[in-house]
Each structure stands twice: as C-alpha cells, then as structure tokens.
Image (spheres, rainbow, N blue to C red):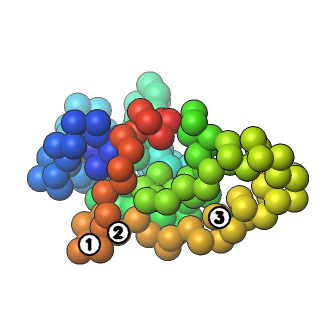
Amino acid sequence: IEFMPLDADGIWTNDLVVPVDEILARVNDACPVEPVERTSAPATRYRFADGSGSLGIVASVSDSFCSTCDRVRLTADGQFRNCLFAVTETDVRALLRSGASDDEIGAALEGSVASKWAGHQINRVHFIRPSRSMSQIGG
C-alpha cells in the first residue's frame, strides 16, 4: 500500500510516497511479476512469473482507482464514509439511536453514496486531508 495521507502522526507528504512504478521496479528486480486482470478491488494484482505466488499493490496516490471504486466504510463509532478520503460522514449511530426507520437509514446511505466524489483530489490543489487517521476510520 502506498503511503496515504491518513497517518496518525500527520507527517504525510507526497515526497514520502513510494509510487507504484518504483514498487514494481523493486519487486521485478528481485522476482519478475506479470499483471493479473484488473477487478474492482483496490489492489492491482500481480503474479510472480515463476508461479511462486502473487501480490497486490494499492496505489491510491500515484495511480488512483476512484472511477472504479465501489467501497464504503462504517467506522467503529457509527459513521458512514462514502470514500476513504471523505471529509464528511453520515451519522448512522445517531439515526439508529433516534429510532429512524430502515427506509430513513437507507435513504441517508443512498444519499451519501450518490454524493461520492469522482476522485479524492490527492496531488491536486483542492485536496483536503481527512481529519481521521486510517486506524480511526478502519482499515
């Protein structure tokens, strides 16, 4: 997994990211790999040319996969996130505690998913770093 701006210490900068091309070059130097057909999973899969195994690389910084991402997250404290890098959350815990109906909860989740960004904006001027770390989000 590339170093993402979700670290608890807040030290992330783009200069600290080892991009997917460099990761692949280092792996290929040790043991050549070949790509496996892409799926909707966050990791791009590769198999070792000698058949000894496989690996996956999540390149969310240098080669984002936002256009094919179908992932959402529910945090341990009941916050629904439509993107790992989202800066807003839907408070499912509050909905449950207030007695919201299944239809109301479903509508809130559908609304959140419908507002999912086309991309996370890392490497762009408009990027806003999420206030939670990966360990707080769950992952």
Q: Nearer the viewer, mark 1 or mark 3?
A: 3
Name the residue type under label 3. Answer: Val
Q: Residue at point 59% right, 71% down? A: 115
- Give above or below for 130 relative to 28: below
Indicate the quadrant where residue 27 lies: top left
Depth order, front residue of 22/134: 134
**Mark 2 → mark 1, Cα distance in angstroms:** 5 Å
Q: Earlier in the sequence, mark 3 or mark 2?
A: 3
**Mark 1 → mark 3, Cα distance in angstroms:** 23 Å
Depth order, front residue of 59/78: 78
Name the residue type under label 1. Answer: Arg
Provide residue 10's location: percent of width, then percent of height: 21, 43
State the residue lying farthest toward the top. 52
Provide residue 44's location: percent of width, then percent of height: 46, 49
Q: Residue at point 41% right, 33% down? A: 135
What is the secondary structure assignment of the residue under circle 3? helix
- Give above or below for 58 relative to 30: below
Horizontally, residue 78 falls left or right of residue 10, namely right
Q: Residues within 10 Å of mark 1 (few under 14, many from 20)?
A: few
Picture disc at residue 113: 3
Name the residue type under label 2. Answer: Gln
Indicate the quadrant where residue 108 lies: bottom right
Horizontally, residue 103 falls left or right of residue 122, namely right
Picture disc at residue 124: 1
- Residue 65 visible to the viewer: no
Rendered-image quadrant of the N terminus: top left
- Residue 91 visible to the viewer: yes
Picture disc at residue 121: 2
